[in-house]
Amino acid sequence: MKHLFEGLKIIDCASFIAAPAAATVLSDFGADVIKIEPPTGDAFRQTGLAPGQPATEHNFPWIMDSRNKRSIAIDLATADGKEILRRLSAAADVFITNYPVRVREKLGFDFATLEALNPRLIYASFSGYGDKGAEAEKPGFDTTAWWARSGMMDAVRAAGSPPARSTGGMGDHPTSLAVLSGILMALYRREKTGQGAEVTSSLIASGIWANAFLVQAALCGAVFPERKPREAASNALATFYQCRDGEWLILSIHNEERLWPELVACVERPELAADARFATKPDRLANARALIDELDAAFATRDRADWRQRLNARGILFEVVAPVTDVPNDPQALQNDILVPFADSDLKTVNSPFWISGETKVQPRMAPDLGQHTDEVLAEIGYGAAEIARMRASKAVV
């Protein structure tokens, strides 16, 4: 079966998540992605072993973001390594990198150099803080450039609480879709003009875009309200509650005229409907703290599974605050192919988050071992067995 991007050649000369994950999505639709790694391997291979990470025998970060790819391990500081990368780039459609610009220039894979070799090349350049300004060369991760610098880290913390950390890859995966969007637009432009292009994106740009609701308010000179604790939230029908079993759910009731009576009936507190403090929406907003106290007491009487069934039955908009360990068994995630099995493993993985009618995705293949496809890829670009053996002996490739 032919896939949408079958025949499209991608060079993933990047590390960690945000830029390489854009290549992962392209691979889901059939693109041939060659992962360039140094002889010691992409440092991302070690992320799952870091202190505080979930404990498993599987290298779960690498499995997720390097599926479907072919790994070639080369020393780009050697003459042979530079020549291999030039040959690969000359035949590629897309080149993705997040190496610092000075390193790209030193090793000969900056945009100007590769464009001269391949004028149709789409060159996706990714960074932490953008390609201009005093911090252009500053290293960035999603925790720092995307989460902390964008204002989100501060915006989500409760009053008086310390800042909240982001989870692993929380900003990288959304950011990868920005990189992907730029690549796809550049490919469309190439179809119209025949010319390649440089696509640029950054973690800080993606983070500020993710926080654009509040950033736009700041741009308008808004005065931000004092942050309040949960029990003093401004709207009792749009906050979260703890159930008898210690689990949480969050209400998101906007059509109050219709749903307020349903909620009162659901929690079996008919006296709330007759309470003058909660008679109208303005009353409920003015007395939000008192209403939160009443609903706290109500939700504490049943387990979350019971509330889930009762709220759904009355059409009340809410959601469970799900621990991540619930997600692998979420029926919606399974029935909508959000979680899909590998072709060559008993494990499942997280699918890219969109589908196209009339197009099928590749069934995911497990991520490669370091240099697993070195000989195969070198042979495809014209290297003979003797040359490959010589480069192995010199450690230009592994």
Image (cartoon, rainbow, N blue to C red):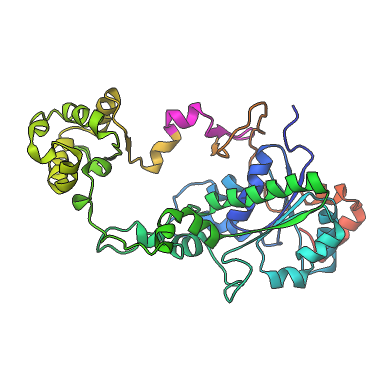
253 left or right of 90 in image: left
Q: Name the residue: 83% across, 48% down.
A: 194
User: For residue 256, what is the image quadrant?
Assistant: top left
Specify start and end residues of the magenta stretch as a single range: 329-346
| Front residue of this view, candidates 188 and 383 | 188
Extreme residue toward the bottom, this view: 134
- Would residue 49 be visible to someone looking at this image? no
Does residue 332 show up magenta in the picture? yes
Q: Position of residue 152 (x, y in %)?
A: 41, 59
From the viewer's perspective, is residue 25 above or below residue 224? above
Q: Position of residue 277 (x, y in %)?
A: 10, 41
| Front residue of this view, candidates 339 and 229 | 229
Q: Position of residue 113 (x, y in %)?
A: 82, 65
From the viewer's perspective, is residue 312 above or below residue 376? above
Q: Name the residue: 81% across, 55% down.
A: 89
Does residue 29 show up magenta in the picture? no
| Front residue of this view, candidates 229 and 133 | 133
Q: Name the residue: 14% across, 46% down.
A: 287
